[in-house]
Image (cartoon, rainbow, N blue to C red):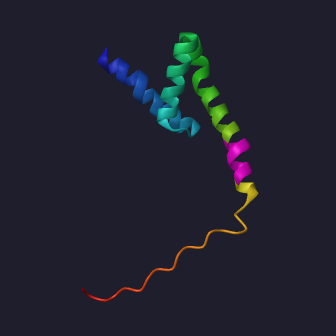
Amino acid sequence: MAIQALEGTLIVALVMSRAVSLHPVAVIFARLVMGTLFGLVRLLLLAVPLAVALHVLLRELWVERMDGVGTDPDPVRPRRELPSRGPS
């Protein structure tokens, strides 16, 4: 039973995460949430595809949009470093 539990949680999550380019913790979390909310059938069928769809939506609607905004036209300038006093 321990081997089956290990395979069902960790190994499957690692394989799925590499197949869909998603972090393994995100896959485990998606499976946990879907299994808790909707039961076994939804867990097996919809957990990872919905997590990937959410990831793509966030990336396209938020990250790409923020990258398109550009950089700050008036950035804060870094302070100059003080000259060292020499060996103490």
Q: Is residue 46 left or right of residue 86?
A: right
Residue 65 counted in the magenta span: yes
Kindly identify the residue that appears in the image at 63 percent across and 37 percent down.
55
> Is 38 above or below relative to 74?
above
Q: Residue furthest bottom?
A: 86
x and y, in percent, of residue 45 in the image? 60, 18
Q: Depth check: 54 or 44 in front?
A: 54
Q: Is residue 28 left or right of residue 20?
A: left
Kindly identify the residue that appears in the image at 63 percent across and 27 percent down.
49
Q: Which residues are magenta?
A: 59-66
Q: Depth check: 42 or 87 in front?
A: 87
> Is 52 above or below relative to 61?
above
Q: Quadrant of the C terminus?
A: bottom left
Q: Residue furthest left?
A: 88
x and y, in percent, of residue 37 in the image? 56, 14
Q: Which of the 4 image quarters holds residue 7?
A: top left
Kindly identify the residue that appears in the image at 51 percent across and 80 percent down.
80
Q: Is residue 11 left or right of residue 29?
A: left
Kindly identify the residue that appears in the image at 73 percent across and 42 percent down.
61
Q: Main secondary structure of the magenta part?
A: helix
